[in-house]
Image (spheres, rainbow, N blue to C red):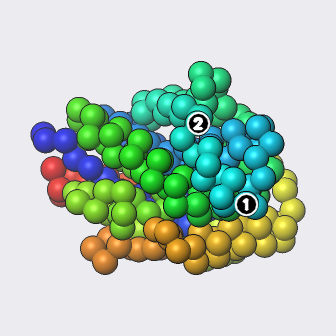
């Protein structure tokens, strides 16, 4: 089968990562978590004392850290200048700051280039998950999926992952981040015109995975 390129976009808490990893593993494709890349560059900014509220300061160092993503869906890795940051990029501090960093055009240009080159070098094809993959990064993807879910379902899934985090606070933080991601000027979170929308509110993870696998198989 020729290399198939799958773009999976949507807001947080829709099951994007779990779905994308499982679909890639099941079909023998590579996997790229683009949110992890934005988190990694944000972690580097925070660690190096860059004022992330100042877009000029962020843009000035956009090219500095070396970000390397492993694309094996069964063991995705991410390093910054050789350091594994898989854990530190999931902290609340990074989560609360990533939208400001990812809104800076110089940051997006840099990360988008990395994403395109990884997609182009994936021999068997790749599942790329994010916010602007179908609209901006890979507009010629063979299949575009846009995952949605009610805010209640998304907050419940997130607080489940965070093991008992306050549901209300999680919901507020999630809505705040989605609003920032959807309203920024440069490649905001958006559904591509030719994307298939899947509302996951009343579906189990297994049902979403099966639905996407079927859609990919139709394209192969
Ligand atoms: O998917 P995840 O929640 O890890 O993404 C973290 C953040 O990275 C998002 O809130 C968004 O600000 C940014 N992001 C982005 N474009 C992408 C993927 C993620 O701006 N393609």
Residue at image location 53% in from the left, 34% down from the top: 67
Residue at image location 67% in from the left, 47% down from the top: 42
Residue furthest out toward the top: 82
User: Percent from the top left, x then y, of residue 129?
Assistant: 45, 53
> Label 2, on which residue?
64
Which of 200 and 43 lies nearest the eye of the viewer?
43
Label 2 CA crowd tier, 10 Å (few <14, some 14–19, many 20+):
few
Residue at image location 59% in from the left, 22% down from the top: 82
Q: In which quarter of the image is the N terminus?
A: top left
User: Percent from the top left, x then y, of residue 143?
Assistant: 26, 60
Label 1 CA crowd tier, 10 Å (few <14, some 14–19, many 20+):
few
Q: Distance between the residues labelled 1 and 2?
A: 17 Å
Q: Earlier in the sequence, mark 1 or mark 2?
A: 1
Which of 73 and 217 lies nearest the eye of the viewer?
73
Describe the element under mark 2 as helix, strand or loop: loop
Count of marks, rendered view: 2
Compared to residue 72, the image places residue 189 above or below, namely below
Residue 203 visible from this viewpoint:
no
> Label 1, on which residue?
54
Residue 32 relative to residue 15: left or right: left
User: Residue 102 occupies which quadrant of the picture?
Assistant: bottom right
Residue 94 visible from this viewpoint:
yes
Residue furthest out toward the left: 1
Residue at image location 59% in from the left, 63% down from the top: 103
């Amino acid at each position: 089968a020729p290399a198939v390129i799958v773009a999976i976009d949507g807001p947080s808490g829709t099951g994007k990562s779990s779905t994308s990893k499982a679909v890639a593993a099941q079909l023998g494709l590579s996997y790229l978590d683009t949110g992890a890349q934005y988190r990694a560059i944000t972690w580097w900014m925070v660690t190096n004392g860059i004022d992330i509220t100042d877009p000029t300061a962020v843009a000035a160092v956009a090219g500095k850290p070396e970000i390397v993503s492993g694309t094996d869906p069964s063991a995705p890795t991410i390093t910054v200048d050789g350091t594994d940051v898989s854990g530190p990029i999931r902290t609340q501090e990074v989560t609360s700051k990533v939208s400001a960093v990812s809104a800076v055009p110089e940051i997006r240009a840099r990360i988008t280039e990395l994403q395109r080159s990884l997609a182009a070098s994936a021999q068997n094809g790749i599942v790329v998950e994010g916010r602007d993959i179908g609209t901006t990064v890979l507009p010629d993807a063979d299949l575009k999926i846009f995952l949605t879910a009610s805010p209640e379902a998304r907050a419940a899934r997130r607080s489940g992952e965070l093991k008992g985090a306050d549901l209300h606070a999680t919901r507020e933080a999630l809505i705040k981040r989605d609003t920032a991601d959807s309203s920024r000027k440069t490649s905001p979170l958006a559904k591509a015109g030719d994307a298939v929308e899947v509302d996951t509110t009343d579906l189990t993870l297994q049902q979403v995975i099966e639905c996407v696998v079927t859609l990919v198989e139709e394209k192969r």
